[in-house]
């Protein structure tokens, strides 16, 4: 990928602007549709019935206190097989009055406390009329589950079963901020409906970004080469101490395959902890929103555009009626083409947030994601050769990134 395509591969959709993740996504441009994703895509991994999976090798978790087998023996009983019947829909056309069958989604989840709370992905249970659970250690007994809340901005959901019917110890939640690339990890879940399957690998990368079901960006995502396939959605990614450090959510695929090619993504457990607390208490979660699209400004692009700053986040779009528009942030109006890619060259460049220097969109996304609606942030902005400070009052994130 050349440097200018890379610039446009980072639309600021974490609390800012649009895209869609249900189905298949372009890995290069997770949202906004600015760049074609080539032959590499990311997809949610709830089971769809297809078994077109590329063969993949797994390696033992290395350097940790527990082997993959020990982790499986200790934690497998608390991993849930989830079936979510989708609601029937009725066509709006008077010529097609019959209800349409919604189908059943299958995925994974895991027990997090003694109250019967199970953590999973929002896309596993979204739009469901009935959810049932089978725990790994309960000999296939089917339990009814209630959806307590879904947060499509982080792809996290909490469901609950009767705790008196569960004979399993809750999984320990670890610290995803303490991970290092190369750490051994284990994934337990139900790929293609094959219940309580275990795979192992390593942390391949940290601080990735993926698109959530509502089009916003999930930051600080954990990348792993542990085999993850449709049906693994919502299952735990576990470190070598046996603690959960992520929720397996998406995979990258190449060519025509929809199965594992060794690039999986897990929502970091530190994000999921915060969201789960809100979902259990209120049924919903709050997220800060600013309302821009943008890309990375690199020294090479800055030189091409003859800018006096050489890194930061260059604003490419400002959402109508958003906090960014109300504060006066400006997107570029003059479009130029650099190495075949259209760029609005004269937009604001954000170089710092609350005095903390940023090098690009990832930094801006991560900082906004640490805030709450109603918080105030101060942006250092380069515009027309001058630097100024702009204060923004963050709002509640809209229901989807297209708003």
Image (cartoon, rainbow, N blue to C red):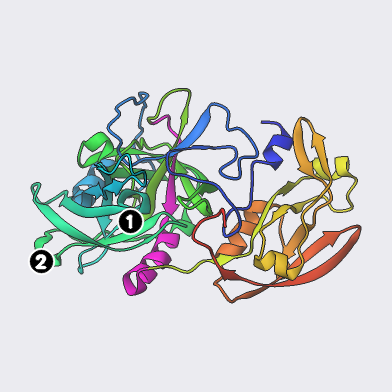
Q: Residue at x 84, y 50 (%)?
A: 346
As measured in the structure, the alpha-carbon distance from the residue carrying label 1 to the one carrying label 2 is 24 Å
Q: Which mark is residue 164?
A: 2
**Residue at the extreme front of the image, as rendered:** 94
Q: Residue at x 42, y 36 (%)?
A: 225
Give the tally of numbered discs. 2
The stretch of residues the image draws in magenta is 260-283
Visible residue check, residue 186: yes
Q: Which mark is residue 243?
A: 1
Q: Quadrant of residue 354?
A: bottom right
In depth, the one of 374 and 352 nearer the eye is 374
- The picture places residue 198, in percent across and down from the top left corner, at 26, 39
Asked if the residue at tag 2 contacts the one at tag 1, i.e. Cβ–Cβ closer than 8 Å, the answer is no
The quadrant the C terminus occupies is bottom right
Which sits earlier in the primary sequence, circle 1 or circle 2?
2
Visible residue check, residue 78: no
State the SS at label 1: loop
In depth, the one of 114 and 313 nearer the eye is 313
Q: Is residue 380 above or below residue 335?
A: below
């Amino acid at each position: 990928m050349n440097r200018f395509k890379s610039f446009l591969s980072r639309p600021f959709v974490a609390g800012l602007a649009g895209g869609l993740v249900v189905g298949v996504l372009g890995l290069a441009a997770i949202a906004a549709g600015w760049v074609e994703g080539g032959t590499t895509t990311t997809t949610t991994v709830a089971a769809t019935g297809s078994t077109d999976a590329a063969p993949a090798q797994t390696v033992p978790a290395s350097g940790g206190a527990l082997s993959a087998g020990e982790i499986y023996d200790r934690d497998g009983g608390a991993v849930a097989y989830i079936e979510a019947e989708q609601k029937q829909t009725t066509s709006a056309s008077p010529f097609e009055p019959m209800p349409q069958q919604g189908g059943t989604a299958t995925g994974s989840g895991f027990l997090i406390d003694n109250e019967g709370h199970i953590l999973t992905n929002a896309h596993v249970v979204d739009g469901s009329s009935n959810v049932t659970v089978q725990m790994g250690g309960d000999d296939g007994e089917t339990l009814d589950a209630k959806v307590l809340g879904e947060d499509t901005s982080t792809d996290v959901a909490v469901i609950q079963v009767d705790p008196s019917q569960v004979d399993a110890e809750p999984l320990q939640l670890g610290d995803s901020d303490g991970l290092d690339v190369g750490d051994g990890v284990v994934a337990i879940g139900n790929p293609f409906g094959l219940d309580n399957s275990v795979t192992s690998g390593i942390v391949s990368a940290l601080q990735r970004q993926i698109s959530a079901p509502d089009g916003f960006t999930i930051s600080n995502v954990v990348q792993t080469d542990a085999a993850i396939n449709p049906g693994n959605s919502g299952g735990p990614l576990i470190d070598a101490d046996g603690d959960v450090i992520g929720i397996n959510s998406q995979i990258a695929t190449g060519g025509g395959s929809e199965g594992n090619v060794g690039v999986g993504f897990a929502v970091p457990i530190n994000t999921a902890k915060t969201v789960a607390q809100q979902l259990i208490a209120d049924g919903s979660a709050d997220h800060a929103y600013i309302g821009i699209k943008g890309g990375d400004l690199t020294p090479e692009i800055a030189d091409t555009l003859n800018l006096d700053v050489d890194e930061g986040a260059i604003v490419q779009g400002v959402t109508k009626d958003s906090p960014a528009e109300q504060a006066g942030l400006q997107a570029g109006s003059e479009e130029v083409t650099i190495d075949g890619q259209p760029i609005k060259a004269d937009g604001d460049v954000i170089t710092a947030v609350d005095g903390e220097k940023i090098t690009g969109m990832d930094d801006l996304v991560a900082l906004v994601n640490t805030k709450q609606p109603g918080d105030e942030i101060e942006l250092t902005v380069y515009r027309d050769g001058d630097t100024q400070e702009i204060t923004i009052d963050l709002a509640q994130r809209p229901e989807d990134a297209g708003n």
